[in-house]
Amino acid sequence: MFGREVIDKAKGMVEDKRSEIVELASKLIRFRTVAPPGETEECAQFVKSYFDEVGIETIIHERKPKKTNLCAKIPGGSEGTIIWLGHLDVVPAGSLENWSHDPFEGEVVGGRVYGRGSTDMKGSCASAMAAAKVLASLMGRAEVKERLPTVEFWFTCDEEIGAVDGVRWLASEGLFKGDVCIIGDSFGSLPTDPWIDVGCKGYIRVLLRARGKTAHGSMPFMGENAIDKLVDAVGHVKRVEDYPLDLPEDMEPIAESSTQFLLGSLKLTKAQRKAAQRLFRYPTVSLNIISGGVRVNVVPDVAEAVFDIRITPGAPIWKVEQVIRNLLRSSEIKGVEMEITGLEEGFYEPLDSQVVQRMMEAVEVTLGTKPRPKVLTGTTDGIHIEHTSNIPCVGFGAGARGLAHAPDEYVTVENLVMAAKVYTVFPFIWAGKA
Ligand SMILES: [Zn+2]
C-alpha cells in the first residue's frame, strides 16, 4: 500500500498546477470542436503537444480525417491498466443572445471558466491533462513506477453525436484494454458534496406506424383516419410509464441516492418532484416525434409516432418491451404496427464492486468526504466500454450541475482542481488494493 505521504505529495503537486489547469481549460474551449461535424484534430494536437513537452507517449487514432482520438500512455511497472476517458467534442452554442460570455473564449471570471464544453467536458479534460503530467512526474521515480499499473488517458471525438468515429469505433477495434475505466464525463460534484456515477440508464425507442385509407376531408367516413388511430394507440402505449420496474436488490440503494441527487440539485415544482421520485422506479416515456397528414382536406392514410423510453439499469428491458406490446395488442386498434428502432441496455456497477469501492476511497482520501453514488439518466461513452470492451466503468468529473448543453455553461476552478486531484490519486488507491 502507498502511504499517506505519496498521496499528499500528489495532491500538492496538483494544487501547484491550479493556474495551469485553468489555462488548459480555457485553451481547450477556444478550439471550436462543435459536433456536428465535431472535428477534433486541432484540439487533439494541442493536447498532444502538452504531453510531448514532458515526454508522455501519445498515439492518434482516426477513422476519418480530422476526427481525431488521442491516447496518452504512462507506462507502469506493475500489471494492469487504468483508463481515463473523456471527449473533446461539444454541442453547438445555440443562440448567442442567451450567453453573457463568448462561448468560445474560455473567459475566467469569479472563479469560473465560461464557455461551451466547460462543464461537458473540456474542464475534466484539462484536469486529466494536469493529472497525467503529475503522474508521469511521480512515476519517473522507479520505486513509484514499479508499484503502479499503466495509466492511459483517452481524449475522443464524436461523443455528442453517437460516438461513431469515437469510442464506439475505438471499442469495436479492440483498442481499450484495461481493468477499470474512469469516465470523466460526470457532473454534479462539489468538493464538499462529491458524487460518483456508477452506471447509466438504457433506452428503447419505439415507433408506432398507423395505416388507414385516404378520402376527401369532406367525406371522412369514406376513409380510415391514420392520425386518429395513432392518437388512440399513443394513449395506450404511454401507460407503460405506470409499469413498476423490477430492480435488482443491489440497485435499490443506488436508485434511492440517484433520486436524492436530482431532488437536491434541481429547482422543481411539486409535479416535477413527483416525477423525479418515479424516475428510477418506472420507465420514463417521452413521445418525441409525431408525423402524419399531407393536406388539410385529405384524410391521412399513414401516421407515425416515436417514443424515447428510458430504463434504469438492471431492470430487464425485454419486459418493458413486452408490456408495450401487450398494451398495444389489448387496445384492439387495427392497423397499427410497432417497431423497435433502437435499444441499448444500461449498466451499473454494484456498490461493493472493486471499481466503485476504489473510486469511493480515492474521492474520500482526496476530499475528506465520502461520495454518494448515482446513475445517469442519459447515456455516456461508458456504455460502449462496458458492453464492447468489457471494462467496468465509474464516473467522476469536474462538471457543474445542470450546465451541460446550457447557455453560459461554466466550470468552477475548485471543481477543476478537485477532479485533477482525484484522477491523480486514483491509481495509487487502485494499486494499493488491487
Ligand atoms: Zn459529455
Image (cartoon, rainbow, N blue to C red):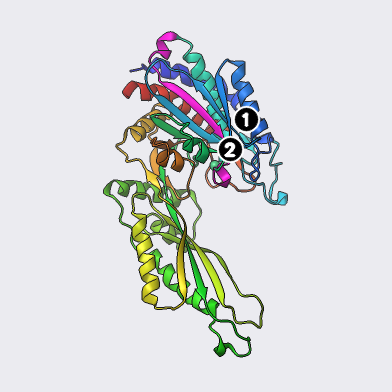
The residue depicted at 35 percent of the width and 40 percent of the height is: 349
Does any portion of residue 230 appear in the rendered image?
yes
Mark 2, secondary structure of its residue: loop
Above or below, 232 against 18 in this view is below
Q: Is residue 348 left or right of residue 184?
A: left
Above or below, 161 against 233 in this view is above
Residue kind at label 2, given as amino acid type? Cys
The residue depicted at 70 percent of the width and 45 percent of the height is: 100
Mark 1, secondary structure of its residue: helix
Which x, y percent locates residue 323?
A: 35, 65
User: Is residue 144 covered in magenta?
Assistant: yes
Residue 327 position by quadrant: bottom left
Which x, y percent locates residue 151?
A: 46, 23
- Which one is nearer the viewer's eye here, 306 or 239? 306
Q: Is residue 242 left or right of residue 85?
A: left
Badge 2 density bin: few <14, some 14–19, many ≥20, Cα 10 Å: many
Q: Where is ligand 1, by quadrant?
A: top right
Find the magenta span and give its range: 142-163
> Pointers 2 and 1 in contact (CB under 8 A)?
yes
Residue kind at label 1, given as amino acid type? Ala
Which x, y percent locates residue 412?
A: 57, 36
Residue 178 position by quadrant: top left
Which x, y percent locates residue 142?
A: 43, 9
Q: Which mark is residue 44?
A: 1
> Which residue position is annotated with label 2?
157
Q: Earlier in the sequence, mark 2 or mark 1?
A: 1
Q: Is residue 8 left or right of residue 64?
A: left
Above or below, 84 against 90 in this view is above
